[in-house]
Amino acid sequence: MRRRSSSLPGEAGPGEWLRCDGSGIPPDHERTLPSRMFKEAVDNAGHGIVFTRLDGTIEYVNPAFEETTGYDASEVIGETPSILKSGVHGADFYSDLWGTITDGEMWEGVLHNVRKNGEPYVIEQTISPIRHEGQTVGYVAVNNEITDMWERERKIEALHEATRELLDSESFDDVASGVGIATDAILDFPINVVRLRNGDQLEPVHVDDETLDLIGDRPAYHFDESPVGEVFRAGEPRIYEDVEELDDDYDRGPIHSWLYVPIGSYGVISVGQTQPGSFTETDVKLVEVLATNAETVFRSLEHEQELARENERLEQFAKTVSHDLRNPLNVAEGTLEQMREFTEQLDRMTRAHQRMEEVIEGVLTLARQGQRVEETEIVDMSTLASDCWSHVSTPGAALAIESNDEFLVEADETRCKHLFENLFRNAITHGNATMVTVGPLEDGFFVEDDGTGIPADERAAVFDTGYTTATYGTGLGLSIVREIAEAHGWEASLTESDEGGARFEFRRSRSY
């Protein structure tokens, strides 16, 4: 709502509109040309216009007001606008309105009213004082009905709220049911079916109760048949004004008009009406909003399920390997104590035990780092990289930070520390690098060195568990790097640096 000073211009002062013959309009013989023109403009205005006395008593309404409210002028003249009250607004709302206009200022706001037939409607209203010879003699209100726009915005907000609730769903079927319920409760389409892709079929997962009552259980459709399959393949919504005109064998009962909207690559929402030609472009847009939101939820759930499977696999792998290695290790360590006098054998066994410990710790780290990052913070990568460098054995090598400005990344600092340390060790130990450089990218960061590099035909395998070029390497270092990147939603890639060494790039995944 806004306030601003206003006055009504015109040679025939605005007070003349309130000189009464009961209509609020001066008799013909008193009208000047400007007043007749003004009367003509008000009568033919597209917005509802109301003139009232100082106490709010209605003196005049134009035809647009009659059309909007359902009241004839004769029914409201002498009444006050309170006959339109819906009960939505409280006393404070009207107190502010009256306080504004009695102070001589214009009031603007949104009103929820009720028509003569009891139907609610919404208007944008402007109320201005009418002044004559410096005195306020009445008020004029101009109303612009926005019911459809307000209802559309209300539905869109409700759809977004429903989507936030759908994010808590644990299965695709739960999401499909939520979509069907929202189609009915929010969009007022009780006849609806939600089908999801299963192989080369679109199977009904949710069928609304009213749909079941009218036409019974719905069939599954193959991608290559039926309007549902066509819409799914095309990826575009489609309205069938009257399905009676379709040349197929499907029984759709008394439902004549159908709207089909695809849910990305996951399925299709079907909405029906018993009357032909029932759907508008607004209906299409609203169902599209719901379908787009549902696609986002399906994609998120799919990602969560994949992460859960991966974490379970890694955890089981870590437990198995740890068990298989720790038992013989304990036996070997007991035997080792009895063989201290055999120096040569002792050295070999010590190295073997250290190697086994490294494998165990590496596997456990790999499992832990693959778990999805839940909490992040803004990390100064320049400081972190320098700190990690100081904790890695790097004889004869140097670290360069290629950034003049703040080098900040949203990440889990502890896991980034593991990432840097593994990359630094790899560059020095396996690449014989003398210079390692860390720097920002537009959507991520890189770590590169001037070492021997990695052959092009081996780059696709470097992140695989067990890959190593060293005799005593565990083959887990770069696997850990990959798991840390994926846990953050980053895409890790390997190319060649300008000096011929290895260049690792980490960028935010588009689908994360």
Image (cartoon, grey):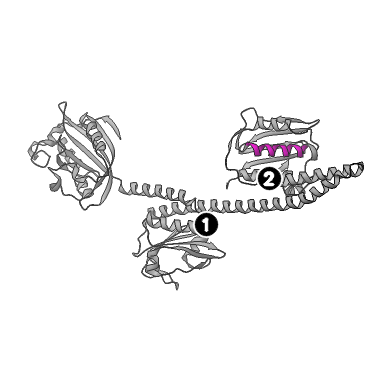
The amino acid sitting under disc 1 is Ser
Question: On screen, 203 above or below 25?
Answer: below
Q: Residue at x 70, y 51 (%)?
A: 319
On whether residue 107 falls in the magenta region, the answer is no
In depth, the one of 291 and 223 nearer the eye is 291
Residue that carries the numbered disc 1 in the rendered image: 171
Say whether residue 494 is left or right of residue 4: right
Tell me how many marks there are. Answer: 2
Magenta region, residue range: 413-427
Q: Position of residue 39 (x, y in %)?
A: 17, 40
Please name the residue shown 70% across and 50% down the image. Answer: 318
Residue that badge 2 annotates:
482
The disc placed on residue 36 is none
Q: Residue at x 88, y 43 (%)?
A: 346
Q: Picture coordinates of residue 410 (x, y %)?
A: 59, 37
Q: Is the magenta stretch mostly helix, strand or loop?
A: helix
Q: Where is residue 112 in the image (x, y as percent from the top left)?
A: 27, 44
Counting residues from the start of the chain, the first of labels 1 and 2 encountered is 1
- Between 169 and 116, the residue placed more toward the observer is 169
Note whether 119 is above or below 425 in the view shown: below
* Residue 420 included in the magenta stretch of the image: yes
Name the amino acid, label 2. Arg
